[in-house]
Amino acid sequence: MSQEEARAWHSRAVNQVAAELATQVENGLPEETALARLKEHGPNELQEPPRPTYLKRILDQLNSFVVIILIVASLVSAALGDWVEAAAIMAIVVLNAVLGVVQEGRAEEALAALKKMAAPDAHVVRGGHRLSVPARELVPGDIVLLEAGNFVPADVRLAESINLKVEEAALTGESVPVQKFADHTLDSEAALGDRSNSAYMGTMVTYGRGRGIVIATGMRTQIGLIAEMLQSFADEKTPLQKKLDDLGRTLGIASLAICGLVFAVGVGRYLMNPAPGSTLVEAITELFIIAVSLAIAAVPEGLAAIVTICLALGMSEMVRHHALIRKLPAVETLGSATAICSDKTGTLTQNEMMAVQLCADGQMVGISGHGYNVQGNFTLDGQNIIAAQRPVVNSLLWGGALCNDANLEVTGEQDLQPTYRMVGDPTEGALVVAAAKAGLWRRQMEKSYPRVSEVPFDSDRKRMATIHELRNVTDDDPSPFRSKDQGQFYVAIVKGAPDLTLALCTHQLRRKGIAPLTEAERAAILKANSAMARDALRVLAVAYRTLDSVPAEPTAQEIEQELVFVGLVGMIDPARPEVKPAIEKARRAGIRTAMVTGDYADTARAIANQIGLLRPGGQVLTGAEIQDLSDQALAERVEHTDVFARVSPEHKVRIVEAFKAAGHIVAMTGDGVNDAHALKRANIGVAMGITGTDVSKQTADMVLTDDNYVSIVSAVEQGRIIYSNIRKFVYFLISCNLAEIAIIFIATLLGWPTPLTAIQLLWLNLLSDGGPALALGMEKGDPDIMERPPRPPTEPVINRDMLSGFITQTVAITTAVLLAYWAGMQYFSSLAHADKVHTAETMAFATLVLSELFRAYTSRSERFPLFKLGVFTNKWMQYAVGFSATLLFIVIYVPFLQPIFDTVPLTLAEWAAIVPLMLIPSIAAEAQKFIGRRMDTRKQTA
Ligand code: ATP
């Protein structure tokens, strides 16, 4: 058999495929077999290209304009015989490259870990149980279950297909979904696009359900064969990163111009007044190296790496708070979010449904119980009632449990009572449990009423239908049928939103049989529905109809008509207790929360009230009303609307657009297949990690791993913290760079020797400042970070405040350093020339390094005074500052380093002279914050 033939699974019957892969379509592989096969076949993933080697990465680091200049400078020094300087510059170049590789590695690791977390799960049957396993653990022979919204996790030969439609654009380029048929057997030559009995990895289920046998995994899948790699995580740069890149470039060019000027002034000065004992070449070399170091000093080399690390660490922090960022720019957008549109079910509520009230045959029946526990009683007017007293209620429970995809699985036994676990949608689970409380077990009923076809649920129709064969109906059956009805062959059961379902009913099931539905009865049922909804219950209706035959391709229109109404089920879905304070927190931060739900307006309003989402005067808008509004009218209404009820996915898109038109930066949640469009249109699309479909997760910017609204608010908070931290170290690093340029430029103009040597500048920029800058990136955020309004999205990073900060700091640092240098020259005027210069240089260097370390503390907040933040509340700052200060003392006091760094050991008197100077920049920074706060308060009172 050729390899191609061996792969032609589509030309075999299902049982033949199952036999060859030694698996069972019903029960799947035993767990041990799956494990053994995983070892044999390897993980089900597409391989990514190998990471570049360390050597290559180090060479990449060296491949930058700045580093090349440094290397040239080092070579020039070596050529001139200054071996110490040449070696020192080279050592710094290498150290910087290694640090760069380490930093990049850390950032990459963090991103890779996040990517792994975003990888999809697959639903499989193993050892007879339905399980959810990471898609990478699938093996040939596994039985996977496919549902609308899922990605096909491996190549499969279908064993079952119910209205299954798959979009295969990833593979064939054809974006119209194709229908799949498990029972087809095809020619072995059939082209990929024609293999209607198979589904392939990376394609997407858009409708219906199916079950397939895995025939190929990983690189042996069709997509693995044609694509080397599938990148699902976009390695985009954020707008901020792009802006900072631009800023770096501008600074680089400006500094080069200044370097040229310094160089020209220096040479000109030498020519006019040659220094005794030095040749022109020596003077030019010295100037060349100073000019080069100035260029290095002015370019914020560490900035880009620190931004990346800060973003990566911030994203890991967000993961701890259950928010997984899929697209990097979202981190920044989160910080300026002004509105959150949240689903209700599961996001604001717990999604642990329990049916508590039934309405059938004009009676309101209560159900007691606890969660998914199957113990509970049925009550009428407070009295327990037995099965015989509630025949229509039993039919309601029967219909609700059969038109259902959830399952109660036995997990063990406690005190001789079996314990259960709910698998499936909680809304449906509540119905299965309610039926079990009446002794009606879904699995058993399915034997008498096997499902033969269905029209799956969709959130536009807001209902679903299943078709069952009538087999062995008995007189004590809970269904509306009796043994005399054996002539009827099929029953279609419909369950869904009450108003829409009731509109399709023409009859009603009563204790005495089926009766036409009068208008008065219809009104009474709707009234009962509203009453239940106002009690915050989620209400579903159940109806049915008999059929003579089953259509090959049943459509909703065909099936869902002339129905017999059975009753209503009301279930509670308690609000998440933590949501109320989170909504309040968002509100204080200037962020509105709106509920967008498919559920009934009354239910939505009741829950919105409970959780404090509905503001006084806040309105409720329904999908039907949205339909009648123009886009502009809707944009005007959103400002006053807190609840959007009965909406379909297409309304969600309009709501997002309306919020945007009203000037909002909006985060919108979604979970269904049809929500993808709204998620894409929102500024921040948020998908549900637990209940969400793969499609929604793939489109979203952010995935909530716990489906909880609270996690959105924490993510916004983190987004704000990350952005403000980036601002802090941009301010810290760039003001230092600006000051260095100013120091050297002014000294040159004054005709002084250069106060800072090339090596000292390199040392400061590449080593000493990096740690504190990184520590600023780990700040916890100002205490009032969620008390302030959102940042306007168009505001540049370097805004007016930061510009005035730059000016103050440049003046303060330059003054401090030049004063220290001047004091050094004056104080030691009687000493030999070389020592005098080295002392002054050391004093200038120590003043600059230590003033940076003091400034690092005041840069921890842009508005709060340091004593209010607590001086020692960021432990990373202590480590970073301690490390940099130690480095400084080593450079000054370790004798063999002194000639390299042109330093001399400072005396106590010299320290006494410079300590007050090194405090000038921090005092200036605190004073500026103080004035800023005063002006803010004055503005507020005005
Ligand atoms: P949210 O959008 O807040 O999550 P939701 O779950 O009500 O709310 P959808 O899932 O779109 O939104 O459901 C819309 C409506 O469809 C529900 O209000 C309910 O009436 C009906 N419905 C939901 N789930 C089912 C189901 N499994 N079977 C039948 N009808 C359902």
Image (cartoon, grey):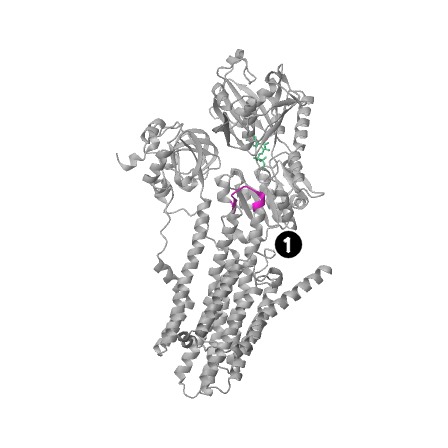
Residue 543 in view of the camera: yes
**x then y, percent, for residue 800:** 61, 64
Is residue 461 positioned above or below 593 on the image?
Answer: above
Q: Is residue 709 magenta?
A: yes
Towards the viewer: 574 or 791: 574
Hey, which quadrant is residue 820 in on the image?
Answer: bottom right
Q: Helix, strand, or loop for circle 1?
A: loop
Hey, which quadrant is residue 710 in on the image?
Answer: top right
Which quarter of the frame holds ligand 1?
A: top right
**x then y, percent, for residue 444:** 49, 21
Residue 864 in view of the camera: no
**x then y, percent, for residue 625:** 66, 37
User: Which residue is depicted at the point 44% across and 49% down?
Assistant: 113
Instruction: Say which amino acid is labelled 1.
Output: Pro
The C terminus is located in which quarter? Answer: bottom right
Is residue 312 positioned above or below 757 on the image?
Answer: above
The range drawn in magenta is 700-711
Q: Report the residue that reaches farthest toward the front.
A: 415
The N terminus is located in which quarter? Answer: top left
